[in-house]
Image (cartoon, rainbow, N blue to C red):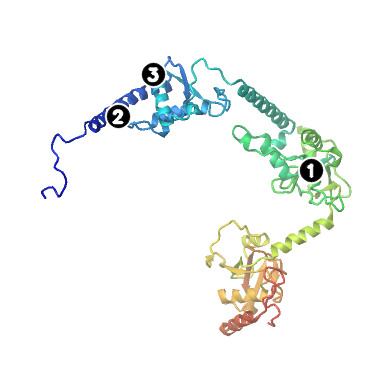
């Protein structure tokens, strides 16, 4: 078997039809590449504005993408839909002002080539390549809808401009100089921030900016349901350059506005003038204010400057406070603040930071940090590190951790026996070892500092730490996740 059972083939044994089809395919591929190369040159002229004999519309974005594709031997799926984005839902030519409807005019030979490729790829979808010659009219229904949208956008633009003019200082976030003899109103700072973002939005941000809610509803949320009194404390005030300002309008829950601003807001955002939170300024002196009784700017002439300086010096010794109508509801505010405090103190496995100070007094920087809550977003190394005044460590504690347990942790870290530890939070001494950290108002992230009195002798703490751990293991677990969690605060020191 010379050919292993396969019939012997000669030079005359071949299929002429297959050979012809293969040759035709090669010729067609070469011809398609040549024609596509020519069409791409015409498309480049169209995009560059060098073609003046355009007679059919195609999508500009589609043509840009078509021009970037590599030349292949045959059409692909990407060659479909040259007019899809410029055809409206009604099957007509979409107005060019619509989103994504930019188009270009191409000459007839380029259009026929693009149309042929599109129908080859999707022969059963006639709408995929709708034909729009030069004389095609834009869809009248879509034009009317776009006109309505444009009119609405113009109207909203005018409304925003008018509100920026009516509330110029509030729109720009400028501080408002206050006078003891003028009437003011209080607005929720969150509502005012949303309003400011809304009226200052432009371009693409207009669609993203949220519209503020009705003002009447926002004011109702400031009053308790039980007593209809104010449940937000009025903002603090401060003297600055001879005038009174809100201390920190950016972080306060309420913002002071003028009476005129309040009236305009009521007209613009559905507020009721009589339901507003009115406010005025009282000075701590019983003699009253020597400030100019008018709300206009005080005279700035040279002859009055000396007198103004004397008045300002006298006034700035007084403490300005804001009074409101309705008054604040101390009962409801107290309940809410107590609940918030309990929630903050009901923590578990959080960090507190302890500085070991070698000396009797802590540096001012540590005292100031101890008086304020620690910023949880600030990254702090969890390793003990050297500082100019001693060491700092972070300790994992819970609200139910006792001061005794905290001192044992400090003892284990710094080697200072607990009897010698003088533990502080700010200027306050933490000394009752049976109290929990929650009892002492120590929050997650607080910075404490400790000094060594050196009164008692150092001793080996290994046995005491071992006993401490044994006691903790045998202590009842209590109600985990609540302030009723059991701890070793009952141990006798």
As drawn, is 29 to the left or to the right of 256? left
Q: How far apart are marks 2 and 1 (CA)?
A: 71 Å
Q: Residue 78: horizontal and vertical position, in percent?
A: 42, 33
Residue shown at the point (59%, 56%) measured from the top left: 377
Q: Is mark 1 on a helix, strand or loop?
A: helix
Q: Position of residue 355 (x, y in %)?
A: 59, 67
Compared to residue 307, the image places residue 95 above or below, namely above
N-terminal of the pair, mark 2 or mark 1, is 2
Q: Nearer the viewer, mark 3 or mark 1?
A: 3
Task: Work out whether residue 383 or residue 17 is closer to the camera in this orientation and state it.
Answer: 17
Residue mark closest to the camera, 2 vs 3: 2
Q: Distance between the residues labelled 3 and 1?
A: 64 Å
- Reply above or below: 317 against 76: below
- Which mark lies nearer to you, 2 or 1? 2
> What secondary structure is found at the residue carrying circle 3?
helix
Q: In which quarter of the image is the C terminus?
A: bottom right
Q: Which of 246 and 334 is in front in this view?
A: 334
Quarter of the rendering containing residue 146: top right
* Residue at 66% in and 60% down: 373
Residue behind mark 1: 217
Judging by the rendered image, the residue that carries numbered circle 3 is 109
Q: Nearer the viewer, residue 302 or 286?
A: 286
Q: Residue at x 31, y 28 (%)?
A: 33
Residue 184 % position (x, y)? 82, 40
Residue 129 location, x and y as percent? 47, 26
Q: Name the residue under label 2.
A: 29
For the residues labelled 2 and 3, the Cα–Cα distance comes to 19 Å
Mark positioned earlier in the residue sequence (2 or 3): 2
């Amino acid at each position: 078997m010379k050919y292993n059972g396969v019939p012997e083939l000669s030079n005359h044994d071949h299929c002429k039809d297959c050979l012809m089809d293969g040759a035709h395919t090669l010729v067609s591929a070469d011809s398609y590449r040549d024609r596509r190369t020519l069409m791409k040159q015409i498309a480049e002229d169209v995009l560059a504005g060098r073609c003046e004999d355009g007679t059919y519309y195609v999508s500009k974005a589609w043509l840009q993408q078509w021009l970037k594709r590599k030349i292949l031997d045959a059409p692909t799926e990407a060659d479909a839909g040259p007019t899809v984005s410029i055809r409206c839902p009604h099957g007509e030519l979409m107005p060019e002002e619509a989103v994504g409807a930019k188009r270009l005019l191409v000459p007839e030979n380029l259009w026929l080539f693009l149309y042929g490729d599109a129908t080859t790829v999707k022969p059963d979808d006639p709408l995929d390549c709708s034909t729009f010659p030069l004389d095609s009219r834009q869809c009248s229904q879509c034009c009317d809808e776009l006109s309505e949208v444009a009119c609405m956008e113009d109207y909203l633009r005018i409304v925003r401009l008018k509100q920026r003019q009516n509330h110029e200082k509030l729109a720009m976030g400028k501080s408002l100089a206050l006078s003891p003899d003028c009437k003011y109103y209080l607005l929720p700072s969150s509502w005012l921030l949303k309003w400011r973002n809304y009226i200052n939005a432009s371009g693409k941000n207009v669609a993203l900016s949220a519209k503020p809610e009705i003002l009447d509803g926002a004011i109702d949320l400031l009053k308790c349901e039980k007593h209809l009194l104010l449940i937000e404390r009025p903002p603090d005030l401060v003297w600055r350059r001879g005038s009174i300002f809100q201390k920190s309008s950016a972080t306060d829950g309420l913002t002071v506005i003028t009476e005129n601003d309040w009236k305009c807001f009521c007209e613009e955002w559905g507020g009721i003038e009589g339901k507003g939170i009115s406010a005025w300024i009282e000075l701590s002196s019983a003699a009253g204010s020597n400030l100019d009784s008018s709300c206009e700017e005080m005279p700035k002439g040279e002859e009055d400057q000396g007198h103004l300086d004397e008045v300002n010096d006298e006034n700035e010794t007084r403490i300005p406070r804001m009074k409101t109508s309705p008054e604040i509801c101390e009962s409801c505010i107290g309940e809410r603040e107590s609940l918030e405090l309990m929630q903050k103190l009901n923590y578990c496995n959080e960090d507190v930071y302890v500085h070991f100070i070698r000396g009797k007094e802590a540096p001012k920087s540590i005292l100031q940090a101890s008086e304020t809550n620690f910023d949880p977003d600030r990254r702090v190394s969890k390793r003990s590190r050297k500082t100019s005044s001693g060491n700092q460590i972070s300790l994992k504690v819970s609200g139910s951790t006792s001061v005794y347990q905290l001192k044992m942790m400090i003892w284990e870290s710094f080697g200072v026996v607990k009897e010698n530890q003088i533990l502080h939070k700010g200027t306050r001494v933490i000394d009752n070892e049976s109290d929990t950290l929650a009892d002492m108002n120590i929050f997650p992230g607080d910075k404490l500092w400790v000094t060594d009195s050196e009164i008692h002798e150092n001793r080996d703490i290994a046995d005491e730490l071992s006993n401490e751990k044994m006691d903790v293991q045998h202590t009842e677990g209590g109600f985990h996740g609540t302030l009723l969690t059991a701890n070793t605060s009952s141990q006798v020191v």
